[in-house]
Image (cartoon, rainbow, N blue to C red):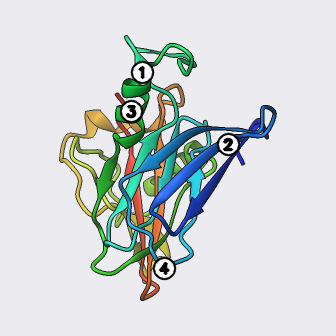
């Protein structure tokens, strides 16, 4: 269910995710692209309801937008889209592969700004945590010696570090798990 309690996601074994409007009791969208023929893979909303994320049997995880982007402004355009445009939009997705086996779970972190602020405030007290950010995506990993999350790659330019503390931008953290129990944490700091 989304944050306004007005929409619900239904995943099924026909490799479709259906977005239902609870108030109108109608299906709004059918998202396609991921593979789910025999598993109990569940889709979920991002914290701001702009995206939907789901794992998949093909070892990728998938992300869809909930609303089309109209010249940089997000607004509900369901009524304005033709059937062909709606079908094209529902099939548009981004997929990311970070596992070698089936991705059984993929979710967005509910409050990524708090997590990022914690990571960067605690990084000043520990020399093993990189404070700078690179323009390439980083996959944090757990440092078992210090039990803190550290970045897998970072730039040497420390002037980029304040970008992570910017609470006005959209930061998305995704947590995925595969069928072997391996967890991955991905951070998208630069939202377009």
Furthest-left residue in view? 156
Image coordinates of residue 33 in percent, x first then y, are 35, 54
Number of other residues with Cα within 10 Å of mark 4, as a class: few under 14, some 14 to 19, many 20 or more: few
Which sits earlier in the primary sequence, circle 3 or circle 2?
2
Look at the numbered discs 3 and 2 and tell me whether their residues touch, using CB distance below 8 Å.
no
Left or right for 83, reference 161: right
Number of other residues with Cα within 10 Å of mark 3, as a class: few under 14, some 14 to 19, many 20 or more: many
Quick one: SS at disc 2? strand
Quick one: SS at disc 4? loop
Toward which corner of the image does residue 92 lie, by quadrant? top left
Residue ID for mark 2 = 20
Which sits earlier in the primary sequence, circle 2 or circle 4?
2
Residue ID for mark 4 = 38
Toward which corner of the image does residue 75 lie, by quadrant? top right
Furthest-front residue in view? 83
Residue ID for mark 3 = 89
Which sits earlier in the primary sequence, circle 3 or circle 4?
4
Alpha carbon of mark 3 to alpha carbon of mark 2: how far? 16 Å
Q: Nearer the viewer, residue 105 or 81?
A: 81
Image coordinates of residue 159 in percent, x first then y, are 27, 33
Instruction: Please say if 167 is above or below 102.
Output: above
Residue 69 image label: 1
Image coordinates of residue 90 in percent, x first then y, are 42, 39
Q: Nearer the viewer, residue 174 or 19?
A: 19
Which sits earlier in the primary sequence, circle 1 or circle 2?
2
Furthest-bottom residue in view? 180
């Amino acid at each position: 269910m989304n944050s306004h309690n007005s929409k619900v996601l239904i995943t099924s074994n026909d490799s479709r995710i259906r977005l239902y409007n609870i108030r109108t009791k109608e299906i709004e969208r059918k998202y396609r692209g991921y593979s789910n023929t025999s598993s109990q893979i569940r889709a979920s909303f991002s914290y701001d309801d702009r995206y939907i994320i789901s794992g998949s049997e093909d070892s990728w995880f998938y992300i869809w937008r909930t609303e089309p982007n109209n010249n940089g402004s997000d607004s509900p355009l369901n009524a304005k889209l033709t059937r062909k445009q709606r079908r094209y939009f529902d099939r548009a997705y981004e997929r990311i592969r970070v596992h070698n086996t089936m991705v059984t779970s993929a979710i967005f972190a509910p409050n990524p700004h708090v997590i990022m602020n914690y990571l960067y405030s605690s990084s000043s007290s520990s020399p093993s945590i990189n404070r700078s950010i690179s323009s390439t995506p980083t996959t944090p990993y757990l440092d078992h010696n210090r039990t803190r999350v550290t970045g897998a790659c970072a730039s040497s330019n420390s002037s980029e570090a304040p970008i992570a503390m910017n609470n006005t931008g959209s930061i998305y953290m995704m947590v995925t798990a595969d069928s072997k129990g391996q967890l991955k944490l991905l951070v998208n700091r630069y939202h377009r």
